[in-house]
């Protein structure tokens, strides 16, 4: 290995959790292989586009309001704690995903975007719900 950027790229592509980076306006700039697997969209389909295809329509307004508030203030509401939310696969399947979010700042401390790590917890959530209902 000859440089840190290669190592960073290898790590991003090989982690088992979906990693998605968006710029300040919510345009996708990184979409790793695990994101392809989790959401069904290739990087080519998602890079340069919005997150809207994976956000359930009824959650989009709240998502973008929270995103804008975080980018503008430089603070996230969850402060790195994981949250359970809903997402949509390309095939229309509704997913439960556990996500963590972080703002990404440049060397001067200005927010340049946001990174999210996500994993599919649909099976676990459905089992838990079934157990509570039983």
Image: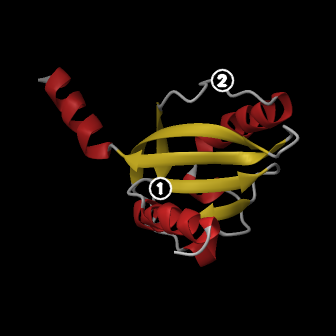
x and y percent of residue 30 in the render?
63, 63
Q: Is residue 56 visible?
A: no
Mark 1 secondary-structure assignment: strand
x and y percent of residue 39 in the render?
46, 61
Instruction: Please name whichever residue, 98 or 128, is drawn nearer the observer in this view of the structure.
Output: 98
Instruction: Please name whichever residue, 95 or 110, is drawn nearer the observer in this view of the structure.
Output: 110
> Residue 37 falls in which quadrant of the image?
bottom left
Q: Is residue 3 above or below residue 19?
A: below
**What residue lies at 15% left-to-right and 26% top-to-bottom?**
131
Quadrant into which the C terminus falls? top left
Instruction: Please name whichever residue, 133 or 72, is drawn nearer the observer in this view of the structure.
Output: 72
Graded by Cα atoms within 10 Å as few (under 14), some (14 to 19) or many (20 or more), the crowding at tag 1 reads many
Q: Is residue 71 left or right of residue 123?
A: right
Where residue 77 is drawn, which disc sits there?
2
**What residue lies at 61% left-to-right and 25% top-to-bottom?**
79
Q: Is residue 87 above or below residue 89?
A: above
Q: Is residue 76 visible?
A: yes
x and y percent of residue 15 in the render?
42, 58
x and y percent of residue 95 in the render?
40, 48
Graded by Cα atoms within 10 Å as few (under 14), some (14 to 19) or many (20 or more), the crowding at tag 2 reads few
The CA span between labels 1 and 2 is 21 Å
**What residue lies at 58% left-to-right and 46% top-to-bottom?**
116
Q: Earlier in the sequence, mark 1 or mark 2?
A: 1
Mark 2 secondary-structure assignment: loop
Give the labeled residue for mark 1.
18
Q: In the current view of this chain or complex, which residue is farthest to the front? A: 2
Q: Is residue 107 left or right of residue 93?
A: right
**What residue lies at 48% left-to-right and 31% top-to-bottom?**
83
> Residue 34 falls in which quadrant of the image?
bottom left
């Amino acid at each position: 290995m000859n440089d840190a950027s290669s190592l960073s790229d290898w790590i991003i592509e090989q982690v088992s959790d979906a990693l998605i980076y968006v710029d300040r306006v919510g345009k996708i700039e990184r979409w790793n292989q695990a994101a392809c697997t989790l959401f069904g969209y290739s990087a080519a389909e998602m890079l340069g586009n919005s997150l809207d295809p994976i956000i359930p329509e009824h959650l989009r307004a709240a998502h973008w309001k929270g995103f804008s508030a975080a980018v503008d203030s430089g603070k996230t509401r969850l402060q790195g704690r994981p949250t359970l939310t809903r997402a949509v696969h390309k095939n229309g399947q509704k997913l439960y995903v556990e996500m963590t979010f972080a703002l990404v700042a440049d060397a001067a401390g200005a927010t340049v975007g946001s990174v999210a790590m996500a994993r599919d917890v649909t099976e676990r959530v459905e089992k838990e719900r079934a157990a509570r209902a039983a």
